[in-house]
Amino acid sequence: MKVIIIGAGDVGYDLGAMLSEEKHEVVILDRDREALKKCREIDVLTVEGNATSAQDLVRAGVPEADLVVAATNLDEVNMVVSLLSKRLGAPKVIARIRNDEFSHPSAPVKAADMGIDVMIHPEQSVAREIVQLVKRAAATDVVSLADGAMQIVGLRLDKQCPIVGKKLSEVTTPGSGVVFRIVAVYRGGFTLIPTGNDRLQANDHIFVVARTEAIGEVLKLAGRTDRPIRNIMITGGTTVGAMIARLLCADATDWKVKLIEPDYDTAESLASELRDLLVLHGNPTDPNLLVSEGITETDVFIAVTEDEESNIISCLMAKHLRVPKAVAMVSKSDYIPLSQTIGLDAAVNKKLAASNEIHRHVRKGSVLAVAALHGIKAEILEFRAKAGSKIVKAPLARIDIPKGCVVGGIIRNGHAEVPTGESAVMEGDRVIVFCLTGAIEKITPYFG
């Protein structure tokens, strides 16, 4: 597939790296020479030019492209790029748009009128991700699969964890009463797709797939429990902070939510809009303010200001004051795998969330759905098994699944199950596969 990415910022760079690794033909256009120089490290073609110039878009190859992604930092530029790209013959255009106006049902101008086929909202993506983490407070990552029937949760194993030192085959035995599968382990900076003989180690970050109703039991086996959520504190009345507050208040009426915003005018505006929570004006890194506002009774602390350092510092203060879970929004994706090392429970990055969401739409040509987990180089793919394909009928133990891949779930007639080696995939089944990025192209032919 030929993909033209407009914008060599973090989103364009991350997306270009993902697509290049999968052997797509990628061209990145930007006017910033230094940003383009960095992009050349990831084996893509670069074009220096103006995103709103039709001539420069033609030079980049938009008329011959299968997909154009408008991923600059400005909504207006992305809209112009989308319009021009459609006029130049691009069959599909994905645009990064922050403005909610175009997604509103009563909007006088729709995204399609601007030449946009798929609209990506980074702030909305990261807000939903944080709300998922709040709901599953014991987990570092939560991804829903199979229309909510299954979940993948990330867990960090401390030295006291009861499963540390055990082989995976000992942890996931069918006789335990809880059916789940450890599909990936992040250890020492590397992502591993484990086998039954691998032993779990202290400080491993494991990713477990199970039916949604069994996740609570999985957490108990790992020495974790989902304690009841009562009090939530958000620092930062940013677009993300306001979205999180709205989602939390709409989800549960018994949660008490406080939001701290350093800018007085923003705090006043949010207070008039969000009537179901308490909005405070103050410095989110002031320990006296946090203590006076009851941080010691807080169950989940969320830092989503635009200042990355402020988010990290306030979360570290929250952990020092024994808040059970602290989540920070960071601007550098490299910080995500390091977040737990420095004491945070979870870190999210809206630029990475945007590039992952765009990537999911790119891959949907060959798979039903794609999901990604922060900080590890692997993806969760959902396939439909076709008649006569390699994956069909034989037990999984007898199929030579490519190295770096593991089947984590089978959905048949609306029922989801975690497979064993004796499970067999049937024609029409939806199959969830967890695989390293480099193995994606190897596993795809197995499903016809």
Image (cartoon, rainbow, N blue to C red):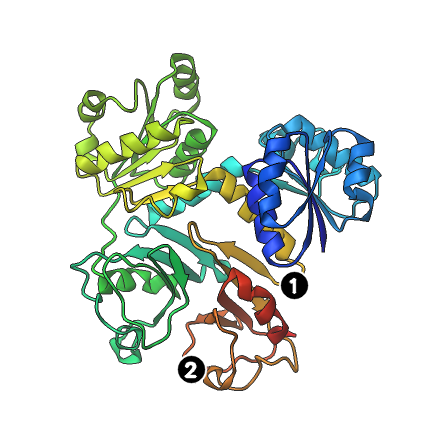
Instruction: Kindly state the secondary structure of the residue where label 2 is placed.
Output: loop
One can see residue 358 in this view: no
Indicate left or right for 419 with 282 as reference.
right
Density class for disc 1 (Cα within 10 Å; few <14, some 14-19, many ≥20) is some
Q: Quadrant of the C terminus?
A: bottom right
Indicate left or right for 154 with 370 as reference.
left
Residue at the image position 60 percent from the left and 75 percent from the top: 446
**Mark 1, residue position:** 366
Residue 328 lies, in percent from the top left, at: 35, 37
Q: Is residue 49 above or below residue 336?
A: above
Give the residue at the far top of this rendering.
265
Mark sitting on residue 421: 2
Residue 195 lies, in percent from the top left, at: 37, 74
Density class for disc 2 (Cα within 10 Å; few <14, some 14-19, many ≥20) is few
Number of marks drawn: 2
Question: Toward which corner of the image does residue 263 lie, by quadrant?
Answer: top left
Residue 68 lies, in percent from the top left, at: 71, 44
Q: Are marks 2 and 1 in contact (CB under 8 Å)?
A: no
Question: Toward which corner of the image does residue 189 lie, by quadrant?
Answer: bottom left
Q: CA distance from mark 2 to mark 1?
A: 25 Å
Q: Earlier in the sequence, mark 2 or mark 1?
A: 1
Indicate left or right for 180 with 77 as reference.
left
Residue 223 lies, in percent from the top left, at: 20, 60
Q: Is residue 160 above or below residue 333?
A: below
Residue nearest the viewer, comparing 248 with 374: 374
Question: Toward which corner of the image does residue 177 lie, by quadrant?
Answer: bottom left
Residue at the image position 23 percent from the left and 55 percent from the top: 225
Residue at the image position 38 percent from the left and 24 percent from the top: 275
Tag 1: amino acid: Ser
Tag 2: amino acid: Gly
Instruction: Kindly state the secondary structure of the residue where label 1 is placed.
Output: loop
